[in-house]
Image (cartoon, grey):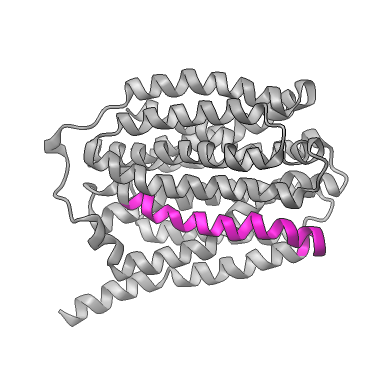
Amino acid sequence: MTAAAFVANFVNFGVLFSFGIFLTPIAESFDTSTGPVAPLFSTAVCFYYLAGAVGGKISDSVGVRPVVGTGAVFMTIGLIVSSVASELWILYLVYAPLVGSAVGCCYPSMIGTVGRWFEHRRASAISLVLAGVGMGTFVVPIVSRFLIDNWGWRSALGIYAAFSAVLLTLCTVAAKDPPANQTSPALGLSKILRSRKFVVLYAALVLGGPGFYAPVAFYNDHAMSEGISGGKAAVLVGIIGASSVVARLVISALNDRFVPMRQYRFGQLLLLFCLLVWLLAGDSYVLFASSALLHGIGWAVWFTAAPNVLATWFGVADLGGSVGAFYTALGFGALAGPAVLGFVIDSSGYEVAIVIVIVTSIVAWALCFIPERLATSSVNHR
């Protein structure tokens, strides 16, 4: 089950997070700028999180296999139709909802199921599952650059459609729910979503989303605008993936020794430093690469902690639904991030856009100290 979740994350996030490599080729083929194309990524991410909220809840109720199988169909059809799209609006109609929803079908449902399979090594198992996200982010952007340079972006999407169909079908067959006696009593998703701790952390994630997604969407084009070659620029997203894989494996090997909420805040702090280094990068590839390295490590620390924070607070019976609902906050952040920042970059440059996400990330990090105070005040009240 853990291997199936790793592979599903590798495929889905590899395709989704390689979008920055496709950004300029798509814009050029439709004779437009990056501004109208960048929201395509944001829209796909929004569908990912909205579908994740639904898919996670369904997998908690009826099982993981039907949800993952639906994701496999969505990904395959979305990539095939997108590869032959004759107008940009077709990508908004097909790529964004189907590719985004495919990721949403697999990610929360897989995490929730793996979380229920494990008790004593849950954080380690989830870290291994999430290493698939980093590995896909490392490998697929580099492969995408090679495919696009040699055969164009349409052929690249067609090739990914074929691989996705095979690998995600195998993941669907391998996906299996744990025995019923391994799950804890359900607290109820509606009660979880109404809790003050969940609401505060959700608001913080909305504000942190733009700072997380801006580098993934714009590292490639920003580096190239500073005179860095396309090949070296594509490696930046690969650095994010590679560093996150290593960090997730280290976290897994440490065997659940971190306090989840402290780990969560530390990951956010690393992402904030990533943005500060990016702001200072100029035409320095070393600073671009350093920023990408910090992004990957921060991403691993932050995202590995999130399911464990929710499992610690609310148990694992509703983990798929709570993770899916929680990550819809990133969907709103992504919509306000790359979508808006693409037009900010066109009008005012990259530095202004980076400053904006630095400010929102600082506020997000500060908000994450509130849930522990809520818990402390509740204990004192009792």
The C terminus, quarter of image:
bottom left
Residue 84 location, x and y as percent?
A: 67, 26
- Residue 245 makes an appearance in the image: no
Residue projecting furthest to the left? 181
State whether the magenta stretch is mostly helix, strand or loop: helix
Say which of 41 and 136 sits in front: 41
Residue projecting furthest to the right? 227
Residue beneath the point at 41% across and 35% down: 129
Residue 229 location, x and y as percent?
A: 84, 37
In the displayed structure image, the side of residue 49 where residue 215 appears, left or right: right
In the displayed structure image, the side of residue 358 where residue 250 appears, left or right: left
Say which of 26 and 110 sits in front: 26
Residue 96 location, x and y as percent?
A: 57, 42
- Residue 186 makes an appearance in the image: yes
The vertical placement of 207 against 54, above or below, is below
The vertical placement of 67 against 341, above or below, is above
**Residue 290 lies in magenta, yes or no?**
no
Residue beneath the point at 35% across and 30% down: 2
In the displayed structure image, the side of residue 123 where residue 100 appears, left or right: right
The N terminus, quarter of image:
top left
Say which of 69 and 179 sits in front: 69
Which quadrant would residue 68 be assigned to in this image?
top left
Looking at the rendering, the stretch of residues picked out in magenta corresponds to 322-351
Residue beneath the point at 49% across and 46% down: 47
Which quadrant would residue 144 be assigned to in this image?
top right
Say which of 142 and 109 sits in front: 109
Residue 351 location, x and y as percent?
A: 77, 63
Q: What count of labels does the image hold?
A: 0
**Residue 344 lies in magenta, yes or no?**
yes
